[in-house]
Amino acid sequence: MRKVGLVIDSTFSVDPAYAKQHNITVVPLKVLIDDKEFVDGQIDPQLVVEALKLKKDVKTSQPSPEAFLKAYEEQLETYESVLCLTISKQLSGTNNSATLGQTILENKKVAVVDSETTINGGAYLTEKMIEFFDQGHTLQEGLAHLEDLKSKGSIIFTIDNLQTLVKSGRIGKVQAVIGNVLKVKPILRFKQGVLELEHKVRSVPSVLAYLVKEVEKLLAFGKVVVRIAYVDHTTFAKQLEHDIFQLGDKIAVKITGVISPVVSAHVGLGGLGVYMAYE
């Protein structure tokens, strides 16, 4: 019997059926399109894509501390302790709300941890932690295991225009100007809470080739897991999956689908994200 309950936020894009099967409480963020509010996880991702194309005002808002408090109380009805995983605090104030919720609850059996990742990295960590806790491990053992998992993975993503990230304060204006003026495809890496403009190429084929090469490098460490997500370019995602599959059976690669509407709002059009980790 699992001893530790799990709370996550909606940016993880965990399949609702999986969350229900493993009794995971998902605390939703919200998307505002021209001031009309939608709940993340209950909104068609295409609404955000269309809004971005029409250059509508798209904003997001984090959950309240009370929403997390309620989630903790719900999980503590079944489990001895609770782990709460959130999107990186470098990208959202969600972790702060989760921490405030834990402070209000005043229960040391609840631990709030910054996943230090985004896009499909959170879903991967969720699955690995469920596997670990299903083996009967304690919360403290899980915290150490989680740090090890985080050190072995990173998100690499590309977008059409850096201005979306500038607008949301995720990347500097100077880097954006350099990328947009030169008409290059920026490649960014997000690892353990740090976002960096890692490389620039001239075309989508060059982006795919770069990503395949980065995955190939991880083979030196053992089995590799690759998760691919996108905002609006399914063709590129399928091509990348095909190219990575050719690297051999030591790599487990799959397309996880559309990036969470909340994250898509900040990444922007042309977003293609790849979480890669070795095991």
Image (tube, rainbow, N blue to C red):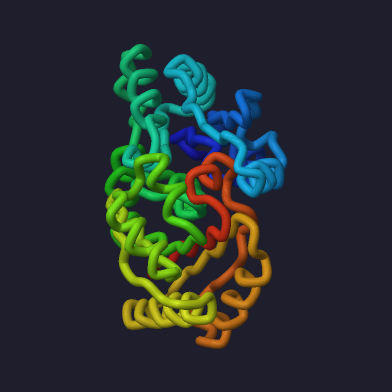
- Seen from the viewer's position, the closer of residues 36 and 144 is 36
Image quarter for residue 108? top left
Q: Residue at x 71, y 47 (%)?
A: 46
Up-down relation of residue 77 to residue 59 (above or below): above
Residue at horizontal 53 percent and vertical 81 percent from the top? 205
Q: Percent from the top left, x then y, of residue 88?
A: 36, 42
Instruction: State the residue lying farthest toward the front.
Output: 181
The percent position of residue 249, horizontal first and vertical second, equals 54, 83
- Corner quadrant of residue 175: bottom left
- Looking at the image, can residue 255 be seen? yes
For the question of whether residue 25 can be seen, the reply is no
Q: Where residue 172 sits: x, y (%)?
A: 29, 49
Task: Name the residue located 56 percent from the left edge and 72 percent from the top edge.
Answer: 253
Q: Horizontally, is 109 left or right of 132 in the view? A: left
| Residue 70 pos. (x, y %) | 51, 17
**Where on the picture, by quarter, is residue 4?**
top left
Counting the numbered discs, the total is 0
- Which of 187/221 is in front? 187
Position of 151 relative to 41 (above/below): below
**Residue at the image point whose x is 32% and y is 51% from the top:** 145
Quarter of the figure with the C terminus: bottom left
